[in-house]
């Protein structure tokens, strides 16, 4: 038996932000990052629609990229002060992930990050508030998922909090909110969508429900991401990428992810590499590693009229290059000395990451390390 869990309500399409007018509640806290949702008018429109729903709103701002536990605790204190019954995560993945974690601490103030990172450790939610997710980037699918990734900057580690309790109650997928994304963000987040679709498709608990969504999202990314890079004001293409992100999110929240994410969490937390960029560098070599135990990568090569896992790995590399993302970790500016000093610790943490549990091939320490090393150098791994 299996379950398929997604938000109770999903509003999608250009202009769908207006559905906020139908929410119920008394007071909302809107969690945002920096100035982008202010500059593009998304915050103002969100506040306007909430007001039309007779919901008072206040804003918690300043969530950084790769949100830290310090920011989460500040936000939880703000929630306790304001006592919202609606929590709105508005913006990129960081704002929504941080809002989810703040929600946990709002409902359970004595929570500990390391304990929350154990599989399915989150207690029953919605005792004080429900959750609305409104992404302004087409990448993480966090509006669909029971996942929040929080960074402990002192330890240099990202902790994924995994629980269906964190699946938002309402998700709004409005491509108009993405029009102001710069090219490098569009590329990194779009490749993140691809990684979600691919890892969900090959998950060791994959099923037909999630396969169809994952494969559909993969197809849309390959067909649409280059167009969005070339035509940033093409709102129809923006909506397609937003839908692909949502579809991949639906898939992976139910069958989870694999070692692309286990490993990417570490290079992001240690070296500050953007998540989608890290995933895109790792994906081809993880494809080569996992292909020894599954034919699903060869099946994905069929999207291009090809037939092998290596064909698919090379298609990923070609897409990555076409949208301007580097092909090795070394190209991102990590020195050999710094890399060597931190490689074993990253490998150990990747082995412990919950995503590793769902990888189709069970990796050994030395195998993870070899994949990391090949990706640092930008060469094909042979394992």
Image: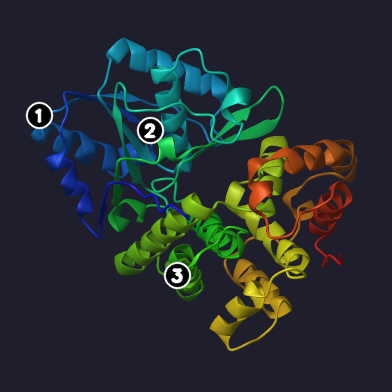
Which numbered disc, 2 or 3, marks the residue closer to the eye? 3
Which numbered disc, 3 or 1, marks the residue closer to the eye? 3
Residue 173 position, x and y percent, is 31, 53
Q: On residue 212, which mark appears?
A: 3
Q: Residue at point 70% right, 82% down?
A: 308
State left or right for residue 49 relative to residue 77: left
* Residue topped by disc 1: 54
Sequence-wise first label, 2 or 3:
2
Q: Is residue 169 above or below residue 322?
A: above
Q: Are marks 3 and 1 in contact (CB under 8 Å)?
A: no
Q: State the SS at label 1.
A: loop
Q: Quick one: label 2, few (<14), some, or many (20+) residues within 10 Å?
A: many
Query: Please, which residue is most extreme toward the bottom here?
Result: 305
State left or right for residue 350 relative to residue 193: right
Q: Are marks 2 and 3 in contact (CB under 8 Å)?
A: no
Q: On residue 32, which mark appears?
A: 2
Q: Nearer the viewer, residue 73 or 126?
A: 126
How far apart in space, not on screen, are marks 1 and 2 (Cα)? 21 Å
Residue 220 position, x and y percent, is 44, 71
State left or right for residue 326 relative to residue 98: right
Residue 229 position, x and y percent, is 47, 66
How far apart in space, not on screen, are marks 2 and 3 (Cα)? 32 Å
How far apart in space, not on screen, are marks 3 and 1 (Cα)? 39 Å
Residue 114 position, x and y percent, is 63, 24
Corner quadrant of residue 155? top right
Q: Residue at point 52% right, 18% down?
A: 111
Sequence-wise first label, 1 or 2:
2
Q: Nearer the viewer, residue 27 or 65?
A: 27
């Amino acid at each position: 038996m299996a379950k398929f869990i997604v938000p109770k309500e999903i509003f999608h399409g250009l202009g769908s932000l207006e559905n906020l007018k139908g929410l119920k509640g008394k007071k909302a806290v809107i969690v945002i990052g920096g100035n982008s949702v202010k500059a593009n008018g998304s915050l103002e429109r969100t506040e306007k629609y909430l007001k039309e729903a007779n919901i008072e709103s206040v804003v918690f701002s300043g969530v950084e990229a790769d949100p830290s536990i310090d920011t989460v605790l500040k936000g939880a204190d703000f929630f306790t002060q304001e006592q919202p019954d609606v929590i709105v995560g508005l913006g990129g993945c960081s704002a929504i992930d941080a809002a989810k974690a703040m929600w946990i601490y709002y409902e359970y103030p004595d929570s500990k990050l390391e304990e929350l990172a154990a599989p399915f450790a989150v207690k029953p939610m919605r005792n004080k508030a429900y959750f609305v997710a409104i992404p302004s980037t087409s990448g993480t699918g966090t509006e669909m998922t029971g996942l929040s990734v929080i960074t402990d900057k002192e330890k240099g580690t990202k902790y994924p909090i995994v629980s269906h309790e964190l699946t938002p109650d309402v998700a709004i997928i409005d491509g108009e909110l993405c029009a102001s994304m710069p090219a490098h963000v569009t590329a990194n987040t779009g490749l993140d969508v691809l990684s979600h679709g691919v890892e969900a498709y090959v998950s060791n608990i994959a099923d037909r429900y999630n396969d169809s969504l994952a494969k559909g999202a993969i197809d849309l990314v390959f067909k649409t991401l280059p167009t969005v890079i070339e035509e940033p004001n093409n709102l129809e293409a923006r909506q397609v990428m937003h839908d692909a992100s949502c579809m991949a999110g639906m898939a992976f929240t139910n069958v989870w992810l694999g070692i692309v994410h286990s490993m990417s969490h570490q290079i992001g937390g240690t070296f500050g590499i953007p998540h989608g960029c890290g995933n895109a560098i790792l994906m081809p070599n993880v494809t080569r590693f996992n292909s020894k135990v599954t034919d699903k990568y060869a099946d994905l090569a069929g999207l291009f009229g090809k037939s092998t896992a290596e064909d698919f790995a090379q298609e990923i590399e070609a897409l990555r290059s076409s949208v301007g993302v580097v092909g090795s970790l070394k190209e991102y500016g990590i020195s050999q000395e710094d890399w060597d000093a931190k490689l074993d610790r990253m490998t150990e943490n990747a082995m412990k990451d919950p995503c590793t549990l769902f990888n189709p091939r069970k990796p050994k320490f030395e195998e993870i390390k070899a994949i990391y090393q090949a990706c640092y150098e930008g060469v094909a791994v042979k394992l």
